[in-house]
Image (spheres, coloured by chain):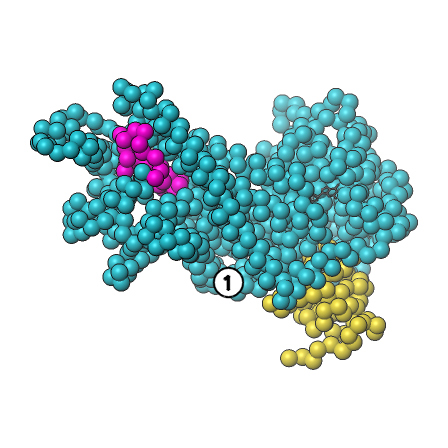
Amino acid sequence: MTPLSQLLPGQYGKLTSLNPERSVDQRLMALGLLPGMVLKLVRKAPLGDPLAIEFAGQVVSLRLTEAQTIIIDVAADCPIQRPRPQA
Amino acid sequence: MSAAEPGLTVALVGNPNTGKSTLFNALTGLRQRVGNYPGVTVARKSGQCDCGDGTKVELIDLPGLYSLSAASPDEQVVIDALSGHLADDRRPDAVVVVIDATNLLRNLFLASQLSELNLPVVLVLNQADVAAEQGLKINTELLSRRLGGIPVVLTSAWKGEGISAVRRAIGEALRARVRMPAVEWPPLVEEALADVAAGVAADIGRAPGRADVERLLFDSTTSVGQRLGWAAPRRDVVIRAARDKVRRAGYNPLAAEPLIHYERLRKLLEGVVQGGGNRTGGSAAVDQVLLHRVLGPVVFAGIMLGMFAAVFWLAKFPMQWISGGVDALKLGVAPLLDGMPMLQSLVTDGMIGGVGAFLAFLPQILILFLFVSILEDSGYMARAAFIMDRLFSWCGLNGKSFVPLLSGFACAIPGILSTRTIEDPKARLATAFAVPFMSCSARFPVYALMCAAFIGPLYGPGWESVVMVGMHCVGLLFAVPTAFVLTRFVLKVKPQPFVLELPRYQMPKPRDVLWRMWQNAAEFVSRAGTVIFAITIIVWALSYFPRDPAVEQRIRATAVGVAPAVVDAQVQSAYVEQSWMGRFGKSVQPIFDPCGFDWKITVGVLASFPAREVIVSTLGVTYSVGEGAEADSKHLQQVMRDAKWTEGPRVGTPIFSLAAILALMVFFALCSQCGPTVATLAQETGGWKWAAISFVYMTALAWLMAVAVYQGVSRLA
Ligand SMILES: Nc1nc2c(ncn2[C@@H]2O[C@H](COP(=O)(O)OP(=O)(O)OP(=O)(O)O)[C@@H](O)[C@H]2O)c(=O)[nH]1
Ligand SMILES: [Mg+2]
């Protein structure tokens, strides 16, 4: 269980939970980001924020702070398995 | 429904960037702007469409949206159009849902929500060419059957493929009125919806539409309650109880809608799509470079630099041709009007000179829009917003502010309109407020004239370009702190989410790019022919009249033994000085005296409030009125260089000193001198308040900065 904000570029996993009270998450749900969906952190913007995430065949941007409460079950076969330790 | 029987209307709806406007253009023969960025269309546009059998319907192109729970003003436009609750609107008779064939699942979510509107639906699967390229095979018959028999058409709107099938399908939908079956809610959710509907009906006395009920139950922030006049305490009680019911069904009430719709769609799409592998592969490889940590910003800076370099330097040559043509035209026309000095002056100085000076900037507009449309149509614009978001977030805005601000370098009006894609009204306002600071193409003539007349000749072409680039940054320099203060302390904007789809890259389509350039050029030229032309003539008349022959006689009587050319010049300046414009300028000049402006510049500044580019032609008129054919642009520069103060403490020194030139340019960089921009701001911010604040703030800032620059530089120099 890792917050999306701590994934490394290239890592992916299944979405376990997000926060439906928040309008950002409501947007993402409308785009099809629902629990169980595989989600990949494609990259971070050059300045470290925002993130580009890929799910259901589309790439969408998202800010780091918004990604903190989006929880991912990182797949075991990810290219880099160990999430960055919390700063 | 209105009394007079109106024709049938059909609305185009769908996710952003699916090709609605492209399809609209193909169906109506019109030319709406298209582009590879989510949020190109921000208002409703309508046109006539033939259904293939001679029946005509009114087709409406709408902004794109992902879901019916509207967040931004452009999305609200769609909701309003579909529910027909705006005073001048009817509900459409049918909707065409345009879907990106490469991503059926996500696109169908909106269609599934729309089924609650109970309108006949045509489903258009667009971008079939891309789907085929990706190896996707779509069974449209099966899809149609599963959707209750609504027409499903596969198209490539851009190539014009499948358009006549869409026409026939629209005709069929209007005749057969087949609806898409609505989603089946779990029993408890259905009950909750019925409770809300009953609650509304009990309180306001009429049954609400099904779609409205769903918004009330599923959205945490919806304006439907206000619209229906369903008031707070009762409403909240009913909705809380209904949401508890949804919870008992095992759903978070705020997540229930997408969960249930997507579940339905996943089943519905089983076996409909075959094949297709890596859908984002090609673009990911390009992003590897363009969004790279180091290369990304380098490429971005390179593109921006290249763009402005092209606008400044490439445009120089065609600009010279235009100015040359204008001068030649003056020389050619002047002799025809010899003997009619007033008409000669009107035609050569007023009409040809004024409008010609303005038209010389057409090449720059064309080049700027060439770049903007290529960036947009290729898909890079969304990446630029992605790269810039961090910097914008610092002043409370987000990456979506990038497109409005960049457009602002061409013209503030499209820039302000494109802020509609920003969800938060305060962030939107702050962006719209910052847009007029961007150095729009109308400021260019002012900088160009000052640089060509003074900076270049006095300090060399190197400094000329430095000043040119510098002036383009002045606005930005003030826009950033302005936005910062506005978002942090005045509006108190909450941190903005930034959810933007990064579309796939594509080759820019020459047809669309050229069309965009043409449209903007046509608008610019028509402005030259109308607003600018009218102001030029008014300014000319105000500085030509009254023309009392006694003025001339007095000068000629006293000037004995003076060269005739000098006498002529004295006569001309005496006439201008006692003209209406001269008198007015002189009475207002004290306000601008601390900026180093004489009364002639003051006249130019005042005349430029409706449209700033007028200053060039006004200076042309006030400094060379009555000189007929000789008054070409080189001549104007010479006259301006020779102009000296004739009274006051600065008598004998040049009017256009370095300090005054810089002050004048800074004034124009910051001042709110554009009637249409102020009007657009009022329209987009819902009232004159912010437009008035913007006008006063920018104008006061411009005056202050001009005074600071003039006083500072003249002390130093
Ligand atoms: N390959 C391909 N591209 C298409 C097709 N139709 C549209 N496009 C491109 O898709 C992009 C978006 O088209 P628009 O017509 O602006 O889309 P829209 O749905 O009106 O977008 P918004 O107004 O932003 O909601 C443009 O770059 C079009 O050239 C198609 O059939 N095939
Ligand atoms: Mg459009």
Q: Which residue corresponds to the image point at 35% horizontal and 52% vertical from the top-left?
A: B455
Parent chain of label 1: B
The quadrant holding residue A7 is: bottom right
Q: From the image, state the color of chain A.
A: yellow
Q: Is residue B320 above or below residue B290?
A: above
From the image, which quarter does the N terminus of chain B lie in?
top right
Residue B245 visible here: no
- Residue B598 or B484: which is nearer the viewer? B598
Q: From the image, state the color of chain B.
A: cyan
* Residue B172 position within the rendered picture, expressed as x and y whole percent measured from the top left: 81, 29
Horizontal side, residue B448 vs residue B423: left or right: left
- Residue B640 or B498: which is nearer the viewer? B640
* Residue B557 position within the rendered picture, expressed as x and y whole percent measured from the top left: 9, 28
| Residue occupied by mark 1 | B395
* Residue B694 position within the rendered picture, expressed as x and y whole percent measured from the top left: 41, 50
Q: Is residue A26 above or below residue A2?
A: above
- Range of residues picked out in magenta: B607-634
Residue B658 visible here: yes
Tag 1: Cα neighbours inside 10 Å, few (<14), some, or many (≥20)?
A: many
**What kind of secondary structure does the magenta stretch mostly adopt?**
helix
